[in-house]
Amino acid sequence: MIERASPVQLRKALEMANHFVKAGINFVPVPVANEEEQRALLARAITKLNAMEQDAACAERSGE
């Protein structure tokens, strides 16, 4: 079942998109049907961002 997003949820999503833009991180907006699906996709996004952070740290160390 598709649940309508609240204004608070939409503001948070827009803030996150703006953070990605300011950081120069390319991203793909993905619509979600409900909170359960959103939690699962957020967990994947966090895992991906952590991996990107580790890659950047390794590249920085190797460039020293």
Image (cartoon, rainbow, N blue to C red):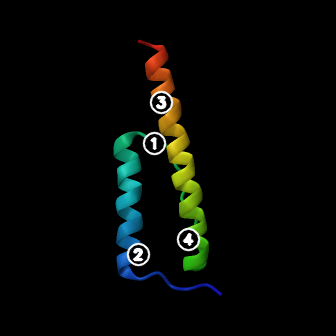
Q: Which label was assigned to residue 38?
A: 4
Q: Are marks 1 and 4 in contact (CB under 8 Å)?
A: no
Q: Residue 35: give x, y in percent of width and height.
A: 54, 78
Label 1 element class: loop
Nearest-to-viewer mark from 1 and 3: 3
Tell me which amino acid carries mark 2.
Answer: Gln
Q: Nearer the viewer, mark 3 or mark 4?
A: 3
Mark nearer the N terminus (2 vs 1): 2
Which numbered disc, 1 or 4, marks the residue that appears first in the sequence? 1
Q: Residue at x 45, y 19 (%)?
A: 61
Numbered label tally: 4
Q: Residue at x 34, y 44 (%)?
A: 22
Q: Dot 4, how many residues are within 10 Å of its Cα: few (below 14), some (14-19), or many (20+)?
A: some
Task: Give the residue pinned by disc 2.
Answer: 9
Q: Closest to the observer: 27 or 43? A: 43
Identify the mark at residue 12; answer none if there is no mark: none
Residue 56 percent location from the top left of the image: 48, 30
Q: Amino acid at mark 1?
A: Ile
Q: Residue at x 44, y 21 (%)?
A: 60
Q: Residue furthest right?
A: 1
Q: Are marks 1 and 3 in contact (CB under 8 Å)?
A: no
Q: Name which of mark 3 and mark 4 comes first in the sequence.
A: 4
Residue corresponding to mark 3: 56
Which is closer to the viewer, label 1 or label 4?
4
Per the image, the residue denoted by label 1 is 25
Q: Say above or below: 26 vs 58.
A: below
**Helix, strand or loop for disc 4:** helix
> For the residues marked 2 and 4, what is the alpha-carbon distance in whole angstroms?
11 Å
Sequence-wise first label, 1 or 3: 1
The amino acid at mark 3 is Ala
Q: Is the C terminus in the top left, top right, bottom left or bottom right quadrant?
A: top left
